[in-house]
Amino acid sequence: MKLRNKLFIQHSITIVMLLAVMYVVVNYTLSKSMIERDTQTLGQYYSLHRIEALKIVNDKKISIEQLFSGTYAPLIASHLAANSNFQVQLFDPEGMIIGDSGNKEDLIKRSDIDAALAGQTASVITEGENSKLLIYASPFVYEGKIVGGFRYLLDLNKHEETLSAMRSWFIGVALGCLLIALLASYSFSFFIMRPLHALQQALKLVAIGDFSRKIVVRSQDEVRELADDFNQMSAALQEHIELLHYEQSKQKKFYDNVTHELKTPLTSIIGFSDLIDKMERMDDIRTCNVYIRKESTRLLQMVEDLLQSSLKGDEAWLVQVERADLAAILTDSLRILEPTLHKSSIMTTLQVEPCEVYADPKRTQQVLFNVIENAIKHSGCTELAIRLEQQEYHCLVRITDNGKGMNEQETAALFVPSEQKLNRPISTHSHGLGLLLCKQLMELQGGDITVYSREGSGTEVVLMFQVESLPPQVLLQN
C-alpha cells in the first residue's frame, strides 16, 4: 500500500473516530440531560403531592395510617396521577405497593424502594415488558418517622423517539462532513507525496531486506539527502546486524537461566514460611528461620552476580571448583526442599556415604534443586530415592522416582536447547531451561548428568562428580 493511501486512511480513521466520539458525547449528554430534567420534574411533583397529602391528613379527613393503607392508597394514587403523564404508586414501611394509579408491573422490592425506606431519594432506570421506565422513589416522613413513600413511574418511550430522531439527523450531517473531509484529505496527500514518488520506487529494490543495495536519487533536494542517509544507514546495519543477533542470543540464554534459578530459593522461603505458622516448638521455628535466612542470602547473592555480570558485560556462568563434602551438600539441599516435598506428598529416602569431590557447592546445589523439582512437578511420583555412592574416580548421585517416566524421544530431547525444540510445551511450571542449565553447570565443574527413563517405569537421573581435581585447561574447555 502506498504511503499516500496510508495517510489517507489515517486521516479517514481519525475523522471517523472524532465523529464517533462526538456522536457518543452528544447522545450521552442529551440522554443524561433529559433524564436529569425528568428526575427534577418528578421531584417537584413529589413536593406538591406531599403538601397535598399532608393537607388531607391535617384536615383530618383521614389519618396518616389510613393514607398508607390498602383502603385509601389506591384512591390517593389515582388522584395524584390525574392530569399527569406518569404512574403514581404508594408503598408502606414494609416496602409493599399498596396503591397504584396504573396497570404496569409493580416492580416490588426494587432497590429504589429499599433506598427510600432508608431515608434517601432514589431514581433508577429499568426495562418493563414493552417499555423503558424511569422510577423515582422518595420517603414520606411524618413527625420524624418514615411512614411510607411515593413512587413515580415515567415511560421513556418518547425520550427514545427523540433520541432516535437526533441520531438520524446527526448521522446524516456526519456523513456529509466525512465525505467533504475525505476528499480534501486525499487531494492534500496527493500533492504532499508527489516529490517522494521517485524515492518510493527506489525503496522497492530494498523491500526484500537487502541492505547492501544503494538507492540512487538524482534530484537536488531533501529527497536526495534522505537517500544518501539511507545508504549510509544500510551499510552500517549490514555490518552490525549479525553481531547484534549474536549478542542478543547470548544475553537471552544467560538471563533466561538466571531468572529460572531465582524461583528455587523463593519457593524454599515460601515453604519454610508456611511451616512456621504450623509449628509450636521454638527450636523448629529457629531451624526454619535459619533456612529462610540461608535461602534469602543465596537469592541476594544470585541477584548481585546478575548485576555484576550486567556491569561487566559478561554473560558466562562463574564456577569456583573446590574440595567439598557432597553428602553434606545433598543433605542440606534435601532439607531446603522438604516443605515442597511434604506439600506434594512425596516420600523421600536418602542414602549417603562420605564422599569428597571437586565441585562448586552453590552450582551443585542449583543442579540438585533443578533435578528434584523436575521430579516433583513433572513425574507424578509418590516416592523419591536419592543415593550417593563413591567409585574409584567418581562420586555418583542417583535420583530415582516412581513416576510416569518418558519415552526415548522425550528423553533424547531433554538437553536440546529450547529454541531447537519443535512444539515444546511451555507452562507456568516449566520453561524448558532447567535440565539444559544443569548439564552446563555439571560440565563446567568437570562432571556430567545422565537421564535413564522408561515410560511407565519412572526416571533415574545420575550426577557424576570428580573425586580428583581436573587441570584448569580441561575446565576452561568445558
Image (cartoon, grey):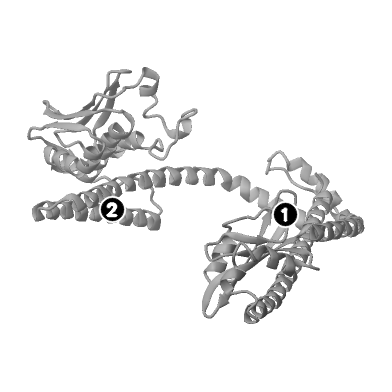
Badge 1 density bin: few <14, some 14–19, many ≥20, Cα 10 Å: few
The residue type indicated by label 2 comes to: Leu
The answer to whether any part of residue 81 appears in the image is yes
Instruction: Work out whether residue 29 or residue 191 is closer to the camera in this orientation and state it.
Output: 29
At label 2, counting other C-alpha atoms closer than 10 Å, the crowd grade (few under 14, some 14-19, many 20 or more) is some
Write down the residue under mark 2: 299
Q: Position of residue 452 (x, y in %)?
A: 28, 21
Picture coordinates of residue 52 (x, y %)? 69, 77
Which residue ends up furthest to the front in the rendered image? 61
Residue 125: image location, x then y, percent: 67, 59
In which quadrant will I find the C terminus? Answer: top left
In this view, the residue in front, 151 or 310, is 151
Mark drawn on residue 478: none
Q: CA distance from mark 1 to mark 2?
A: 73 Å
Which residue does the numbered mark 1 point to in the structure image?
103
Q: Quadrant of the N terminus?
A: top right
Residue 137 at least partly seen: no
- Image location of residue 401, percent across then percent down: 24, 26
In the displayed structure image, the side of residue 420 where residue 221 appears, left or right: right
Left or right position of 297 against 7: left
Residue 35 occupies quadrant: bottom right
Question: In screen coordinates, is 173 left or right of 118?
Answer: right
Circle 1 — which element?
A: loop
Depth check, front residue: 252 or 287: 287
Amino acid carrying mark 1 in the image: Asn
Q: Is residue 339 above or below residue 155?
A: above
Q: Nearer the viewer, residue 174 or 231?
A: 174
Sequence-first disc among 1 and 2? 1
Point out the frontmost of discs 1 and 2.
Answer: 1
